[in-house]
């Protein structure tokens, strides 16, 4: 079973139509009840300062959250920005994959689709990294030239 964190990352980073199609599939199969409609709020962004290894709050970020129920299973969808449709779709998928959400066959189909989306996302990231790697400069291979500030000043 795929973790909630991996599932959410794959759905948020992928095309929004993936989450929408999966949520529509769930809604056709079972009844979905909205507990809290999509609403916007602010979340504090916590950052770790590396020199002292301490945490501090950088500021606030806009987020959208939604809660739904499928039977006794409750699902939460939370996403940065003003994206109510995506937050609801994530909540429906979360409830469907919770304990007692939907039939195992439908849960398996959802997980396979999410794993496919995760694979496409990994391939897209690999291609972007390959494009970046072409223009990367390695300063260790500059023929022994001293490029320090002291050498330039002399």
Image (tube, grey):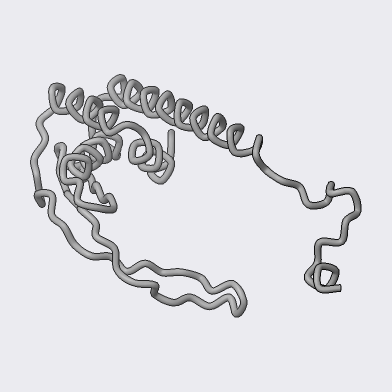
Q: Which residue is painted at 27% across and 40% down in the image?
A: 94
Which quadrant would residue 30 be assigned to in this image? Answer: top left
Rendering coords of residue 3 (x, y %): 43, 41
Q: Which residue is painted at 56% across and 32% down in the image?
A: 126
Name, please, the residue furthest toward the right: 144
Q: Nearer the viewer, residue 136 or 149?
A: 149
In-image side of 73 versus 152 (left or right):
left
Rendering coords of residue 74 (x, y %): 20, 45
Which quadrant would residue 1 be assigned to in this image? Answer: top left
Q: Which residue is painted at 9% across and 49% down in the image?
A: 37
Image quadrant occupied by the C terminus: bottom right
Name, please, the residue furthest toward the front: 154
Residue 50, compared with residue 114, is above or below; it is below
Which quadrant would residue 42 be assigned to in this image? Answer: bottom left
In-image side of 138 versus 76 (left or right):
right
Rendering coords of residue 71 (x, y %): 14, 38
Residue 89, compared with residue 21, is above or below; it is below
In-image side of 45 versus 93 (left or right):
right
Rendering coords of residue 106 (x, y %): 28, 22
């Amino acid at each position: 079973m795929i973790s909630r964190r991996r599932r959410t990352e794959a759905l948020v980073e992928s095309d929004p139509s993936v989450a929408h199609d999966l949520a529509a599939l769930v809604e056709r199969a079972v009844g979905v009840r909205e507990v809290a409609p999509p609403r916007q709020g602010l979340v504090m962004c916590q950052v770790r300062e590396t020199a002292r290894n301490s945490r501090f709050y950088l500021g606030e970020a806009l987020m959208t959250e939604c809660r739904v129920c499928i039977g006794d299973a409750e699902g939460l969808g939370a996403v940065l920005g003003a994206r109510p449709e995506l937050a609801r779709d994530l909540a429906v998928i979360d409830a469907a994959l919770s304990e007692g959400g939907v039939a195992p066959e439908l849960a398996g189909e959802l997980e396979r689709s999410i794993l496919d989306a995760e694979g496409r996302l990994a391939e897209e990231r690999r291609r972007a990294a390959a494009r970046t790697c072409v223009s990367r400069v390695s300063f260790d291979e500059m023929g022994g030239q001293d490029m320090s500030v002291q050498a330039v000043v002399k």
